[in-house]
Image: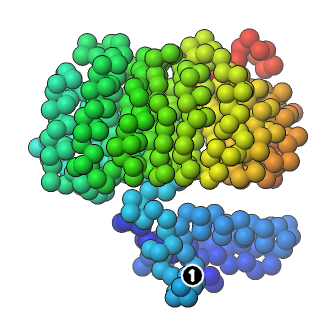
Amino acid sequence: MPRYEMIEGTSSKFWDITLEGVTVTVRYGRLGTAGQSNTKTFPSSAEAKKEHDKLVVEKTRKGYLLVGAPTASGAAATPKEAAPHAGTAFKLADVDRLEGAPGDSAEKFMGQKIADYDPEEGLKDAARKAYRLRQEDSVADFLEAFEQLVADPHAGKLKALVISGWSTDEAGGAADDDYARKIRKALIDAAGKLTGLAALFINDTHGEEYEVSWQYFTDLAPLLEAYPKLEHLRVRGDATGKGKMGTLKSSALRSLQLEGSSLSRKLVQQVAAAELPALEYLEIWLGPEEYAEKKPMADLAPILSGELFPKLRYLGLRDSDAADEVAKAVAKAPILRHLETLDLSLGTLGDEGAEALIASPAVAKLQTLDIRRHYVSKAVLKQLKALPVKVLESRSEREDEEGDEGTRYVTVAE
């Protein structure tokens, strides 16, 4: 039985797979344990072989290594050698996607449990936990706590940092760009101390605190310049017309998440002008035209060309009230040739867009198609689910009458 292992950070796991005629058996678990097994039977040996090969590809992409397989040097490789980005132990599988409006503060970030930073406790678990800084009373208090965090002897081990209330004024109401600039400057000034930082989450806020549409962020480009090893950037917010990112440049950034119901057209254009050759995961919430500007498909063209981000494996164009138009554009886009996952969820996708996806040969070669919170009719949905693709779907809870354009709403509108 071929055996694969992965050892990253504190994680050490194995995965075995056996193909016997029309059955595929996998066994998996932590190294040193018996693990657990699962067997599936297929209609034919050809389909069983196809499933076997697909699972092997998926596991090796996640960093699992066939035990005893030779490296380029001819020596037997170890799981540690095969696991990409072993320095941070973060994988794309650790990226968390919201399934609706943020209803509470995040509990995990990039697979690490989030702990609210307490100066008295310090960063004693910096290598194993993500730490979150909250604005409690004033900007000054926040910056004072941040200075203490940076001065902590374990600051250099911190891999994941979460900031809550990035652009909220001291009164706890409107967004304040001056506050955002102060926090950004403090982060940039701390780059020499936060040398291990690989993941940054800006604006971990939710509806009980501030609506997503009330939040915005200031120029992010200097942050990427200050942290050239940053691999994962997640940003929530952007009130229309105020948010900006500058020209994003990084040779290390692997995932970029822009979560907001009012992302401006300018922001989409700035993403399309970014220089992020290592990017594998891109998530953009396009938002409703009521709050955000209408975004012509031409703005997405550089992204959909497949040339801008050649390593992209996941593309999420979510929460769009023009989801049918987006689907039709993506269905014939060159980028589908190297995507594994296409995510058009949280928007107003209906039959028109779904039919374009069904007619696209490239869509049928995806691994996953996510259309959760859709408005597709049952008949067309049945055709979509007949594709050789894993389809994640759920009908929009806000639908009043199927097929009525007037009742379509994006999932996150404010």
Q: Residue at coordinates 29% horizontally, 22% vertically from top-left?
A: 179
Quadrant assignment, res 333? top right
- Between residue 60 and residue 121, name the one nearer to us: 60
Q: Position of residue 116 (x, y in %)?
A: 25, 40
Q: Is residue 297 above or below residue 66?
A: above
Q: Is residue 231 above or below residue 325?
A: below
- Between residue 188 and residue 358, name the one nearer to us: 188
Q: Position of residue 304 (x, y in %)?
A: 71, 39
Image colouring: rainbow
Determine if residue 106 is in view: no
Q: Is residue 143 left or right of residue 252?
A: left
Q: Residue at coordinates 82% horizontally, 67% vertically from top-left?
A: 47
Total residue callouts? 1
The residue tagged 1 is 72
Quadrant assignment, res 42? bottom right
Q: Is residue 170 left or right of residue 234?
A: left
Determine if residue 332 is in view: yes
Q: Residue at coordinates 58% horizontally, 35% vertically from top-left?
A: 273
